[in-house]
């Protein structure tokens, strides 16, 4: 999945926004909170939040590692997007979106 396809998918999620952070990372957010980060430098890598119960298994799966700086919040980094099918990647991104959205305050949710 290339950046344009990823951008197109993330933008289909309700109230999703995008911005460039740290100079070279495309960040997708809901309610001001990140749910997916795409490294725009080569090689392309993607970080997203996973369920607490899935974190240990995923970081021990080939192609995944704990996401730099945010692994303590159960984020993983997919080093090679071609190791995962488009459908599976969309599943992970949607799951991350849902996990982040669940943590938003009622006030923020009411504005979405």
Image (spheres, rainbow, N blue to C red):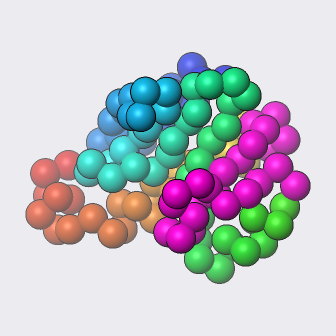
Report if residue 95 is visible in the image.
Answer: no
Q: Quadrant of residue 100?
A: bottom left
Outermost residue on the top side: it is: 4
Instruction: Identify which residue is drawn at 41% across, 34% down.
Output: 22
User: Measured from the top left, where is residue 68 in percent x and y?
Assistant: 59, 54
The quarter of the picture where the N terminus appears is top right
Residue 31 drawn at (x, y percent): 26, 51
Left or right of 85, for residue 21 = left
> As displayed, is residue 108 above or below residue 36?
below
Tell me if 54 is positioned left or right of 96 in this view. right
Q: Is residue 63 magenta?
A: yes
Q: Quadrant of residue 27?
A: top left
| Region rendered in magenta | 62-85
Q: Is residue 106 left or right of residue 71?
A: left
Residue at 73%, 74% (x, y): give it.
56
Q: Is residue 28 visible?
A: yes
Residue 91 locus on image (x, y percent): 63, 51
Q: Is residue 89 above or below residue 60?
A: above
């Amino acid at each position: 999945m290339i950046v344009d396809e990823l951008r197109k998918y993330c933008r289909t999620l309700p109230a999703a926004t995008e911005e460039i952070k740290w100079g070279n990372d495309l960040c997708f957010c809901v309610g001001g909170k990140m749910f997916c980060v795409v490294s725009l430098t080569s090689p392309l890598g993607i970080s997203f939040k996973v369920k607490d119960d899935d974190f240990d298994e995923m970081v021990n799966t080939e192609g995944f590692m704990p996401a730099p700086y945010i692994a303590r919040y159960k984020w993983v980094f997919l080093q090679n997007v071609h190791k995962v099918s488009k459908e599976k990647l969309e599943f992970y991104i949607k799951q991350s979106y849902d996990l982040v959205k669940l943590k938003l305050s009622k006030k923020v949710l009411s504005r979405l």
